[in-house]
Image: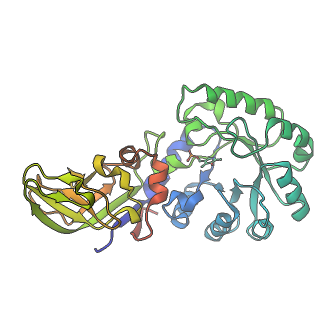
Amino acid sequence: MAVPLLTVDLSALRQNWRALAALSETETAAVVKADGYGLGVGPVATALAREGARRFFVAVAEEGVTLRKVLGAGPEIYVFSGHMDGDADHIRAATLTPMINSIDQMLRHVEALPGHPFGIQLDTGMNRLGMEPGEWAALRDIALAQNPTLVMSHLACADEPEHGMNAFQLQTFRDMTDGIDAPRGLAATGGILLGRNYHFDLTRPGIGLYGGRPFADAAPVAHLDIPVIQVRDVAAGESVGYGNSWVARTPARIATIAAGYADGIIRAMGPKAHVFAGDARCKIVGRVSMDLIGVDVTHLDDQPETVSLLGHHQGVDDLADAAGTIGYEILTSLGARYARRYSGG
Ligand SMILES: *Cc1c(COP(=O)(O)O)cnc(C)c1O
């Protein structure tokens, strides 16, 4: 093996979907934007559909077109960015459901595609996408008369259960939607964990499916094994990598592994991150290069053929912590150069 191997454990993905679905009594959808959080929307969405997911969410219409080819007719595909200028052909051809975000989008949708299904996205305080209370009040009766298939909003702080923003957004969503007939949704992964008040008719987990926080019970889905190219002995006082940022204090054995920041291994994680050779933890030494990383293997009896960066010993959030980021960014940064294998589909 000359390139790193990314193994996507689809049975773990399916297990995570089931576990999240079991936490609410309502329908559970699946968010598969950004190529299934970087893990490959084809195999990911196919596995989730097989597990029972019937509604899917993507960020933009182009992703919806790709997803429709994967899923075939039947499942509903929602587009968070709604109906943007130039989207009408995609929305019609792939039978997508845009989440209408503004009065402008509503007008565009009914003019271009009268009678075509849509959902409504409301802004309850995040100030990112969706109609604000005043806009919604003006459009509400007209929009509801056309039977949106979903009315939803998104929580800004759901990964912090104690945050006052959660209750505030819940109340705002209630104020905007209580009494309507259309199905409602508020919860992504974090919202599912906040409890039944947040579940409404449809939950839409993303990161928890892929093994990330805040779903602490998630099974790891992404496994990344990186081949060792070369092992060398360095004497005390010798340095490793660009900028001489790491200097051996005592004689050391250093393995050079075949991945780097061009593969989405965030350069900033270098000084705090580890890889695993079997069960043994090995420190990353020196700067992460574009295609190479140095690893201290002094304490190992045998020279490893590969080391693991992601897997059972170290998950996406461990790596995110080392890099000062979030698991979402680790996953969606995973590189194009990896060999990919899907197991448990
Ligand atoms: C990305 C996204 C989700 C999924 O959120 P997770 O935190 O990954 O579960 C749900 N809803 C909206 C609007 C999103 O943008």
- What residue is rendered at 61% in x and 25% in y? 164
- What residue is rendered at 21% in x and 53% in y? 246
141 with respect to 27 (left or right): right
Tell which of 104 and 120 is nearer to you.
104
Tell which of 135 and 266 is nearer to you.
266
287 with respect to 165 (left or right): left
- What residue is rendered at 64% in x and 71% in y? 69
Q: From the top left corner, tell me how far across and down residue 3 is, in percent.
A: 32, 72
Q: How many marks?
A: 0
* Residue at far front of view: 243
Q: Is residue 8 above or below residue 102?
A: below
Q: From the top left corner, tell me how far across and down residue 43 is, in percent.
A: 51, 65
- What residue is rendered at 46% in x and 46% in y? 326
Q: From the top left corner, tell me how far across and down residue 59 is, in percent.
A: 65, 57
Q: Is residue 284 above or below residue 2?
A: above
Q: Is residue 101 visible?
A: yes
Q: Is residue 15 visible?
A: no
Tell which of 239 and 79 is nearer to you.
239
154 with respect to 236 (left or right): right
Quadrant, the N terminus? bottom left
